[in-house]
Structures are given as structure tokens and as C-alpha cells.
């Protein structure tokens, strides 16, 4: 008789595989003539699948009796003598089967099935597939972890980090001759679009002197005819009020609906030329420079577009259009800042109040904040995904907070460090925290509007549920950006990138730091009301812009390498003046942030990633921290 029918249900995977093995084993032992006989019926195969699953565990010593065997357990008597399964085995096949198989003292039939090579394969393959499915996430994460080399022990050493950063290619002072030539040509194209170059400039039809010399084989002792570029057009256009940007012949073939244009940059480029006067284009792009070296800004776009001049110019103009027309980065987001939101939170209209509440709520909870630097000297931005709930903040509020934090982090970059470390803390993450809309916006920001700003992205303690989410997000990322993503599972993994003494306490570090927001202080933005001083500083800065442009034109035209080096040094000196002058202008343009109040960003542009916990506690102290008007603010 069959074993009792009451038993725990078997999982499908474990109940099906042995039956497949049993069927194939029996088919393998049956003569081919019998396979086609009428006695071999499909119902016999179905019967095997409807039978109980084979036992997969060794029976205990007390289960030697037939009644103690679990349901579905087949002993030698079951296979060779019982008639229960006789429809599947002929007497001859059963005899051969019994002669070829010798059971162990435990005698369970799963061993007999596995002795057949065919059955063994069919039994193991489903288990392998199941195991691969279960451990897919950790296997994928481990394969994608490309941990940087470095000593994880010892104190943070800024000197060693600076040496490593200086060796990064494609930065000011570390360009190949080909890259230097690309930069010169890119400046020429940029100045043409801004209306700086004269009508007789050779940007459209005439090559630069160095290009002419290289193509015609002109000797170094001979002086090739220089292309005529000057500031004459810019001054003449100001007098006449010209509002049409100069068109570049190399850009005439640009297609608005290019399928390879991921972010619609071609369309934005054409719209920018059609709707913005050259003076506005120039002013907006110069405002993007802030405290950076102008060359460093343009090189970001060249590196992002693999030194393709046309694509780099399209990207630069698209970014300019986004900052000026869409996001209003400088004139709204950074000018209003946290104090403006604090006022609107209490007395604004319904829409303004909601936006202010959403913006400040994210700052107060510390959904994302900057603290410290990694081993490469890059400022660290921590994103605590568990604090985000889809729908809690409006889309506009999320975008405002994202741009504000990215722009603020820019002030923490100091050459040669020009990228940041973003750490996504997925501790306690669940599907309730997932929101694809802000993720897409963040990806667009870094890929389209803040090129070459990401140094490394750390995804810490990603749970199993994140596997499918990462598969989707990775498909949206540019391969270069995706290659910067690393997965860390514990403190030891994090220490490959960040010294343990610099890791916040809630990430199991020993820094002693816990984020706590400090509210805006009344009077901290008093300088922004001093319009007279602001205008004088802006005029001073405009003169520096024109001086830099003039020296750049000389640098572009100069065919002699030695003289070009001298001009390049003069440009660097002007860039240094621009940097120093910006920090005198900064408190008149930018609202103070949390990082100004706690002392991370200094009034003179210095940065202290680990400031003293003592912070200004009243309006007077906060105003001093923001920087009072000094005698040298205005010459």
C-alpha cells in the first residue's frame, strides 16, 4: 500500500525536479521499441507528476520499517516488486534496473535517481537556478564593487591626497598639447557665441595661427599670418544694441531631434541662440564661474563630451539656458536661500508657504547633508534615503533642495579637488522610500548641468529589495557615471574610501558627528540690501572679465609655444584675482547657508570640513561670520 497521504506540502522546485529525473531515468531504461508502443501512455507521465515528491533527506535509523517511511519515499521493494508503479516500468526494464542499482542501508530512492547522469543533471540544474536567483543581488553587488586602493588605517592626510589629485588628466596645468589646442579652440567658439569677437574674426572660416602652421608645414622661424580676433565687435554691438548671437559654421549641421541627444541639449542650444541676446549668454556663463578658474569650467564640458568641441559647446549653452530660464539658480535659489524660506514659511501665500515648508523640512531632518571629506579630499554629501517618503514634499520642493545643495557643495571644492563624493545611506530602506522622479532629476543634474562633478558614488547597505531598483536606475545612467558607483556593506568597506574617524556616528563611524540643523539668524544677509556696494563690486568684476577675455584672445592667436606659456601664466594670474574678488562679492549675491553658519564655508572662501562645534548664537555674531563690509571690499 501507499504511504499515508498526510504530509507537509513540498515546494514546487523540490517536488518537481526529482520526478523529472525519475521519468527520464525510466525512459532511458526502456527499449526504443517500447517507447513507441501503445502501452506507453502520456497518462503514465502525468501520473508520475501527480505522485508525492521524493524525499530529499536521509531517513532516521528508526525508519527502517515500511510504515515509517514518509509519503513518496520509494524503497527497493517499491521499485522492483510493487505494482503501484508497474505502468511505468516493464518487467524486463525493472529487472535491469534492479540489477544495476544497489541501495545503501538508508535505501531512499533519491540516491537511485541521482546515480543516473541524466537524472542528476536535471536534479541539480533547478537547484543551481534557484540558488542563483536567491544570491543574485549579492553576487551582482560584489562584482560591481571596484574598491579604490589605499591604506584604510591612520589619520586623514590631505598632502598625499593633493598629490594624487594633481595627476588627474584634463585639468588646468595638466593638459596634453592636443587638449590644450582643444581648449583654445573652445574658448574661441565660446567668445564668438557671446559676441565678443569681431566680424573679421577667423572663427567661421579661418583657422587659428597654430592650426595653420601645423597643416601647411610652416617652420617655427616663420611667422604665419594670425587670424584677426579682437574685442571690437563686442564694444560695437553694445553701442548699437545688437541682440543676435554670432553663428558658428561648424554648428550649422546640428539636428534638433537627434536620437542620441539624451537630454534634448540640441534643442536647448538652438532655443538659447534664438531667445537670448549674446550679452545675456555671456553674463550667465561668467556667473557660473564664481570662484572657479574659467579654464576649469570649460574643461568640465570638454571632458564630459570627450573633447568634441561641437557637443561641448551645445552642452555649455544648454546648461546656461537651464540655469537662466528654467531653474533660476543664481537670481532665485541661491539669492533667496534659507532665510527667505524661513520668512515665507510663516507669512507667505499658500504656494510660497508650501514650497518653503518642503524646502526647510528636508534641511531640518537632514535628508541630505555635507560632512567631511573622503581620502581623496572630496567633500562628502550624505543622502539618507530612509528619510524620504514619496509624496511628502512637492516635486518643486525636491528639485529646489537638490539644486541648492549641489550649488552649496560647489563652494567646498578647492583645487585640485574638483569633484564630490556622494554617499547614499540605504540603512532601513524599503519600497516606501523609493521615488523615481527625484532620482531622474538628480541624474539629469549631474549628467547634463553639472558635468564632471561626481568623483565617486557610494551605495551603503543596500537591502535585497534594492536589486531590482538598481537594475532600473543603472539603465538610466551614462556608462561613465555608472562606473563611479560602488557598493559598501559595512564599516570596513566604507573605510576603503573614508577614514573611520571621519565617518558620522549613524554610519558606525567614530567622528562623534551627528547632523543638527541650525536655523537662519536674523541679519545674516544684511549685505544683500547694500545695492550701491554690490554694483561697484560687479563693475570691478566686469573689468576682470574683459581683461581675461583680452588675454585669452592673445593666447589663442599666439603661434609661438614659449610666448603662449607666458600668456597662459598671465591668464592664471587674472583667474586668481577673479577668485579673490568673488569672495568679496559673495555676501552681496548669495544668501548665507547652514554651512556658513556652522563655519564650514569661511567668509574669505576658506573651507573647514570639521569646524568647531561652537557656532554663532545671535544675529551680530552671525553677521560677522557672514563677513562684514571691509575697507578693501571696494577700491
Image (cartoon, rainbow, N blue to C red):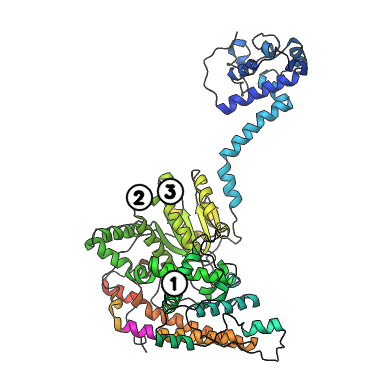
- Give whichever of 422, 480 is nearer the camera: 480
Please state, as top left, top right, bottom left or bottom right, where the C terminus lies in the image. Answer: bottom left
Disc on res. 391: 2
In the picture of the structure, the residue carrying the numbered disc 1 is 274
Q: Is 554 one of the magenta-colored residues?
A: no
Q: Which mark is residue 30?
A: none
- Image location of residue 72, percent across then percent down: 60, 17
Is 535 magenta? The answer is yes
Tell me the element at label 1.
helix
Mark 2 crowdedness (10 Å alpha carbons): few <14, some 14-19, many ≥20: few
| First in residue order: circle 3 vs circle 1 | 1
Q: Position of residue 230 (x, y in %)?
A: 52, 88
Residue 233 or 296: which is nearer the viewer?
233
Q: Is residue 351 left or right of residue 456?
A: left
Mark-to-mark CA distance, 2 and 1: 37 Å
Q: Secondary structure at mark 3?
A: loop
Give the alpha-carbon distance from disc 3 to disc 1, as whole Å. Answer: 39 Å
Sort mark 3 into few (<14), some (14-19) or many (20+) by Cα contacts within 10 Å: some
Q: Residue at x 66, y 83 (%)?
A: 212
- Residue receiving disc 3: 434
Viewer-nearest of discs 2 and 1: 1
Cα–Cα span, label 2 and label 3: 11 Å
Picture coordinates of residue 4, whole percent (x, y): 55, 12
Q: Is residue 255 left or right of residue 366?
A: right
Q: Earlier in the sequence, mark 2 or mark 3?
A: 2
Residues at marks 3 and 1 touching, judged by CB atoms closer than 8 Å: no
Does residue 122 sit above or below 622 in this rendering? Answer: above
Above or below residue 387? Residue 70 is: above
Q: Secondary structure at mark 2?
A: loop
Q: Is residue 121 left or right of residue 384?
A: right
Task: Give the total of numbered labels.
Answer: 3
Q: Which residues are magenta?
A: 533-539
Amino acid at each position: 500500500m501507499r504511504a499515508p497521504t498526510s504530509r507537509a506540502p513540498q515546494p514546487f522546485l523540490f517536488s518537481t525536479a526529482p520526478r523529472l529525473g525519475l521519468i527520464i531515468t525510466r525512459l532511458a531504461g526502456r527499449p526504443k521499441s517500447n517507447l513507441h508502443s501503445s502501452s506507453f501512455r502520456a497518462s503514465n507521465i502525468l501520473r508520475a507528476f501527480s505522485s508525492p515528491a521524493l524525499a530529499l533527506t536521509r531517513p532516521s535509523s528508526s525508519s527502517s520499517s515500511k510504515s515509517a517511511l514518509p509519503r513518496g519515499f520509494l524503497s527497493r521493494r517499491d521499485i522492483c516488486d510493487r505494482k503501484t508503479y508497474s505502468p511505468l516500468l516493464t518487467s524486463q526494464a525493472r529487472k535491469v534496473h534492479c540489477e544495476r542499482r544497489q541501495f545503501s542501508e538508508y535505501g531512499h530512492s533519491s540516491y537511485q535517481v541521482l546515480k543516473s547522469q541524466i537524472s542528476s543533471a536535471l536534479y541539480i540544474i533547478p537547484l543551481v537556478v534557484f540558488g542563483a536567483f536567491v544570491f543574485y543581488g549579492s553576487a551582482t553587488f560584489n562584482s560591481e564593487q571596484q574598491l579604490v586602493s589605499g591604506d584604510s588605517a591612520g589619520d586623514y592626510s590631505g598632502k598625499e591626497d593633493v598629490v594624487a589629485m594633481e595627476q588627474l588628466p584634463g585639468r588646468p596645468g595638466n593638459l596634453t598639447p592636443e587638449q590644450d589646442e582643444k581648449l583654445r579652440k573652445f574658448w574661441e567658439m565660446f567668445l564668438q557665441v557671446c559676441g565678443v569677437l569681431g566680424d573679421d574674426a577667423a572663427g567661421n572660416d579661418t583657422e587659428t595661427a597654430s592650426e595653420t602652421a601645423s597643416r601647411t608645414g610652416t617652420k617655427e622661424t616663420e611667422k604665419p599670418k594670425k587670424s584677426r580676433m579682437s574685442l571690437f565687435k563686442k564694444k560695437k554691438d553694445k553701442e548699437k544694441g545688437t541682440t543676435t548671437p554670432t553663428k558658428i559654421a561648424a554648428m550649422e549641421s546640428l539636428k534638433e531631434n537627434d536620437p542620441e541627444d539624451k537630454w534634448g541639449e540640441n534643442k536647448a542650444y538652438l532655443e538659447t541662440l534664438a531667445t537670448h541676446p549674446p550679452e545675456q549668454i555671456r553674463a550667465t556663463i561668467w556667473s557660473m564661474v564664481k570662484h572657479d578658474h574659467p579654464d576649469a569650467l570649460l574643461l568640465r564640458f570638454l571632458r564630459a563630451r570627450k573633447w568634441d568641441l561641437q557637443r561641448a559647446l551645445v552642452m555649455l549653452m544648454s546648461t546656461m539656458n537651464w540655469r537662466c530660464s528654467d531653474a533660476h539658480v543664481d537670481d532665485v535659489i541661491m539669492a533667496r536661500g534659507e532665510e527667505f524660506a524661513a520668512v515665507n514659511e510663516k507669512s507667505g501665500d499658500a504656494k510660497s508657504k508650501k514650497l518653503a515648508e518642503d524646502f526647510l523640512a528636508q534641511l531640518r531632518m537632514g535628508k541630505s547633508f555635507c560632512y567631511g571629506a573622503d581620502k581623496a579630499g572630496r567633500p562628502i554629501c550624505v543622502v539618507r534615503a530612509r528619510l524620504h517618503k514619496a509624496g511628502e514634499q512637492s516635486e518643486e520642493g525636491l528639485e529646489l533642495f537638490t539644486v541648492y545643495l549641489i550649488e552649496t557643495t560647489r563652494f567646498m571644492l578647492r583645487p585640485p579637488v574638483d569633484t564630490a563624493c556622494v554617499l547614499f545611506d540605504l540603512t532601513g530602506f524599503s519600497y516606501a522610500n523609493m521615488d523615481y522622479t527625484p532620482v531622474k532629476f538628480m541624474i539629469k543634474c549631474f549628467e547634463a548641468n553639472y558635468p564632471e562633478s561626481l568623483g565617486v558614488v557610494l551605495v551603503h547597505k543596500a537591502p535585497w529589495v534594492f536589486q531590482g531598483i538598481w537594475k532600473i536606475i543603472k539603465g538610466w545612467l551614462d556608462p561613465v557615471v555608472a562606473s563611479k558607483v560602488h557598493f559598501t556593506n559595512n564599516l570596513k568597506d566604507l573605510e576603503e574610501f573614508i577614514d573611520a574617524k571621519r565617518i558620522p556616528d549613524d554610519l558606525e563611524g567614530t567622528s562623534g558627528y551627528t547632523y543638527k540643523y541650525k536655523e537662519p539668524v536674523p541679519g545674516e544677509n544684511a549685505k544683500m540690501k547694500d545695492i550701491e556696494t554690490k554694483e561697484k563690486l560687479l563693475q570691478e568684476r566686469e573689468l576682470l572679465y574683459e581683461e581675461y577675455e583680452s588675454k585669452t584672445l592673445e593666447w589663442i592667436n599666439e603661434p609661438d609655444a614659449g610666448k603662449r606659456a607666458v600668456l597662459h601664466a598671465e591668464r592664471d594670474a587674472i583667474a586668481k584675482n577673479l577668485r579673490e574678488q568673488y569672495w568679496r562679492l559673495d555676501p552681496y549675491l548669495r544668501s548665507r547657508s547652514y554651512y556658513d553658519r556652522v563655519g564650514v564655508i569661511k567668509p574669505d572662501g576658506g573651507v573647514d570640513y570639521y569646524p568647531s562645534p561652537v557656532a554663532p548664537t545671535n544675529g551680530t555674531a552671525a553677521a560677522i561670520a557672514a563677513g562684514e563690509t571691509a575697507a578693501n571690499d571696494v577700491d
